[in-house]
Amino acid sequence: MTTGLQTIIYPVKDLDRAKALFTAALGVEPYADAPYYVGFRTAGQEIGLDPNGHAKGMTGPVPYWHVSDIRTRLAALLEAGAETLQDVTDVGGGKLIASVKDADGNLLGLTQDPVA
């Protein structure tokens, strides 16, 4: 089951320039500002900037579907023909992410919030 698209991550080459641009575009300061990730929250959305995204195979923005069981959803995507880009990974505090590429080269991410 999914609760929808609530997160989009952009691969960036110059984190400082991208942070300035997204701060201006969104009209909010980042809630997370680290050398490996800058995150914004606005209008119920998470907008993230990943300076390592290109090295991880990101060719453009990646939408992340919020799911209740990431391993089950990932297995279903792989069975449907998707190719793993990033296996299930804990990115801190129990938050899990994974990403795949479909047959057309489109990237799709999954995220699962920490289990309480």
Image (cartoon, rainbow, N blue to C red):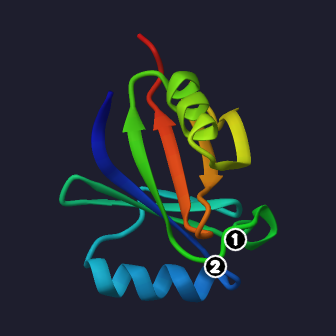
Which quarter of the figure is the N terminus placed in?
top left
Chain-order first, disc 2 or disc 1 = 2
Location of residue 25 in the rendering, given as x and y in whole percent from the top left corner: 31, 85
Location of residue 69 in the rendering, given as x and y in whole percent from the top left corner: 46, 21
According to the image, label 1 marks what residue?
51
* Kind of residue at disc 2: Val
Instruction: Determine the CA span between mark 2 and mark 1.
Output: 5 Å
Nearest the camera: 97 or 1?
1
Q: Crowdedness of circle 1 by 10 Å Cα count: few (<14), some, many (20+)? A: many
The numbered dot on residue 9 is none
* Kind of residue at disc 1: Pro
Residue 93 in view: no
Nearest the camera: 85 or 25?
85
**Side (left or right) of 23 relative to 83:** left
116 to 43, vertically: above or below: above
Location of residue 16 in the rendering, given as x and y in whole percent from the top left corner: 61, 82
Q: Residue at the spot x=77%, y=62% of the render?
A: 56
Nearest the camera: 9 or 63?
63
Residues tagged 2 and 1 counted as in contact (Cβ below 8 A): yes
Q: Secondary structure at mark 2?
A: loop
Q: Crowdedness of circle 2 by 10 Å Cα count: few (<14), some, many (20+)? A: many
Nearest the camera: 12 or 73?
73
**Side (left or right) of 35 relative to 32:** right
* Quarter assignment of residue 22: bottom left
According to the image, label 2 marks what residue?
12
* Quarter assignment of residue 42: bottom left
Q: Residue at the spot x=57%, y=89% of the render?
A: 17
Q: Residue at the spot x=53%, y=50% of the render?
A: 109
